[in-house]
Amino acid sequence: MRQSGQQGREGYRADIDGLRAVAVGLVILNHLGISSFSGGFIGVDIFFVISGFLITGILKRQMESGGFSFASFYKRRALRILPAVYVMLLAVFAAGYFVMLPGDYSDLAEAGGSVLVFASNLYFWKSTGGYFAANSAELPLLHIWSLSLEEQFYFLWPIALLALIRIKSARSRIVMVAVAAVLSFAYAEWSARSGSTGAYYFLHARAGELLMGALLALLPSNGPARPARTWASTVMAGLGVALIAAPAVLLSGASVFPGVNALVPCLGAALLIIAPRFGANPVTWLLSMRPVVFIGLISYSLYLYHWPVISFLHYQKVELTPWVNVMVVASTLLLATLSWALVENTFRYAHGPRRTGKLALGLAIGLGAVAAPAVIFARQGIPSRVPYETLTQDQLDRERSRYWTLVGTTKTEFAPGERNLMVIGNSHAYDLSYALTGNGFSGNVRLIATGGECFNFGHNPVNAEAEPICAKAEHDMLADPQLGNASVIYLHDSWAGVDVVGFRNVVEAIRSKSAAPIYIFGPKMMFTESALGIRRAAAAAGKVTPSDVNAFAQAYSRPDRARLDHDLGNVVASWQMPGVTYVSFITSQCATPDSCALLSPEGAYFYFDNNHFTLQGSRDFGSRLKVNHPDLF
C-alpha cells in the first residue's frame, strides 16, 4: 500500500502510481458498501503485485551491483511505513477514547499492539470469525492485516532473493519463483474451499501474489531492442483492465477467496505493469494522468485512514447513505493528503540540516504509539471515561455461561411433603429459575430444559430440521420421574412461535402427568439490538445516564411481545382449565409495556444480549415478581 516514489526519480513509472489509485479506489468503494463493487477488496491483491514488482526490482539491482545491505533496506522501509502508521494509530486511539466502550477500547489497544509487531493478520485471524464476519465492520484496525502480511514477506524475501541472485541462470530463478507462486495459490484455493479463515490472512496463502510481482521484476530487461508493438501493448492492457474489473464487480464476501479468484486480478495487474514494455497504450496513458497519479501518491495514507473513518461510523450505527459516503471520501482525501505531505514525505526523506529534529520527532511519535495501547490495555479500556458501570462483551459473554450450569436445579430430587417446584422451558425458564432462587424462594426447584430449537415447551420445532430434537425434548420432559412429585409447575420459554393448538396440547399432556397447579408465564420484553449495541448507540447520541439510556432503549424494544402477552392471557383464560393460571411476565418486568429497562439505576446491565437476563436482571425481575405475586415464592 505504498507509493513508488516522486516524479523524476530514476526508473519512476507514473502509470504504476495510477494503478495504485485504481487499487485503493476499489477498496474504498467496497468498504463504503457500494454494491456495484462487491469484489472491490481485490484492490489489496493489486497492491501486493505492485509491491512485489517494485521492491524486488530495487533489491535485484542492488544485489547485482553489490550495493545491497540488510540494515539499509530495513531502515528505508522503517522510515517509509512506520511514521504514517504510528500517527494513524494515535489518531485512532484518540477517536476511540471518545466513542468506544471500555471492552471495545481495550480490544482496540490489543489490535494496536499487534500492528506494532507486524502480526495484525494473525491477531484478526484468531480474534474474528473472518474478514467478512458480521462484527468486522466495527474493528478500526482490521485493514492493517495486509500491511503486517506484506512486512512479514519482506523480512524473508531479501534472504531468499539473495540466494536466487547467486544462481546464474535467469530462467532457473524464474522457474523457482513461479513454482513457489503456484504452490501458494494452490494452497490458498484449497484452504479457502475448506472453509478456513486463515487463507485470507496467512502469508503462505498470499505470498503468491507478491511473488507474481517479483516474477515481473526478475524477467530479463536488457535484451536487444524490439520495435514498439502498440497493438500488443493495447491488447495486454485491455485484458488487464478486464481481469481487474470482472472480479471487482462479480465477487463478494461470500466468494471463495483467495486462491483462483485472487489470481485473476493479480494477472490483470501483472499485464498492466508489463504492457508498456511492448509500446504505448491508452490505458497506461490514462493511468499516468496527473490527477490519477496524485491519488496513487497518497494511496498509502488513503488506505491507512479510510477504514478507521468508515469503521467508527459503523460502530456508531451511522448508515452509509450516499451523502455520508461523499463526506467520508472528502474527509479521507483530506486526512490522506495531510499524512502524505506532513508525515510520509517528512520522514521518508529524513536527511539534511533538520535530520536530527525529524528523527527525534519520529522517536517521540513511535514511543507514543507504543505507550498508548499499553496504557489502554492495562487499564482495561479506561472505564472511568464512562460515567457509570458498564460491562465488556467478554464479561457479558461469561454471564451466558451460567445457563449451562443450571445452578444445580436439574439434579434436584423432590422430597415428599415439601414444596417442590418444577420449572419447564428453554433458557428463558432459566431466567425465571434464577429470579426465584435469587429472591428467597422457599422450596426445592427442578428445571427441565426443552431446548432453544423448540417452543411450546418442546411441543413445536422452530424449524422443520429441529422436529426430531423437539419430539425427544417433549418426550423426555413428560417422562421425567419427578414430574408427578411436583407440588407446583411453572412454564416459561421464549415464545419463539405461536401455535395455540400445540400450546393447549402440551399443557394438557403435562396435566395428564401431574395434578399440581400450573402457572404459565408469558413472554419477557426483548430488544431488536443487543444491550451492548444499544449502549453504543446511546453513547453516540449523547445519552450517558442510566435513565437516559433506558429511555433511548425503548426505540429498540419489541411491542409485539406485549401484544403476544395480552393474547396469550386471553387464550389461557378461554380454556377455563382448572388449576391453570396465566402470569404476565412483562407486567412485573416493566412499569409499563413501553418502559422496560435495559440498565439498573446504578448502570448494571439487565440483559447480556437482546433477550436473556444477566444475573442482575434476573434478581431485579424476581424482586418485582415477588411484590406482585408473593404466592409464587
Image (cartoon, rainbow, N blue to C red):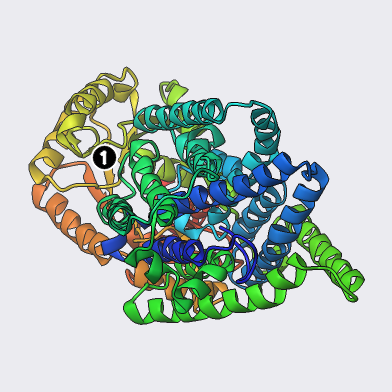
Measured from the top left, where is residue 69 in percent x and y?
A: 80, 44
Residue 255 visible to an observer of this rendering: yes
Above/below status of 205 relative to 172? below
Above/below status of 485 relative to 567? above
Above/below status of 587 relative to 294? above
| Towards the viewer: 292 or 314 | 292
Determine crowd level at label 1: few under 14, some 14-19, many 20+ residues with C-alpha closer than 10 A: many
**Residue displayed at 49% across by 59% down:** 138
Q: Is residue 483 left or right of residue 106?
A: left
**Residue displayed at 13% across by 43% down:** 577
Measured from the top left, where is residue 257 in percent x and y?
A: 37, 40
Residue 336, quarter of picture: bottom right
**Residue displayed at 57% across by 44% down:** 121
Measured from the top left, where is residue 438 in percent x and y?
A: 54, 45
Q: Amino acid at mark 1?
A: Ile
Measured from the top left, where is residue 557 in percent x and y?
A: 34, 66
Q: Disc 1 marks which residue?
A: 518
| Towards the viewer: 267 or 226 | 226
| Towards the viewer: 289 or 448 | 289
Residue 511 visible to an observer of this rendering: no
| Towards the viewer: 295 or 494 | 295
Residue 105, quarter of picture: bottom right
Q: Is residue 586 left or right of residue 333?
A: left
Instruction: Give the SS element for disc 1.
Output: strand
Quarter holding the N terminus is bottom right
Above/below status of 405 relative to 570? above
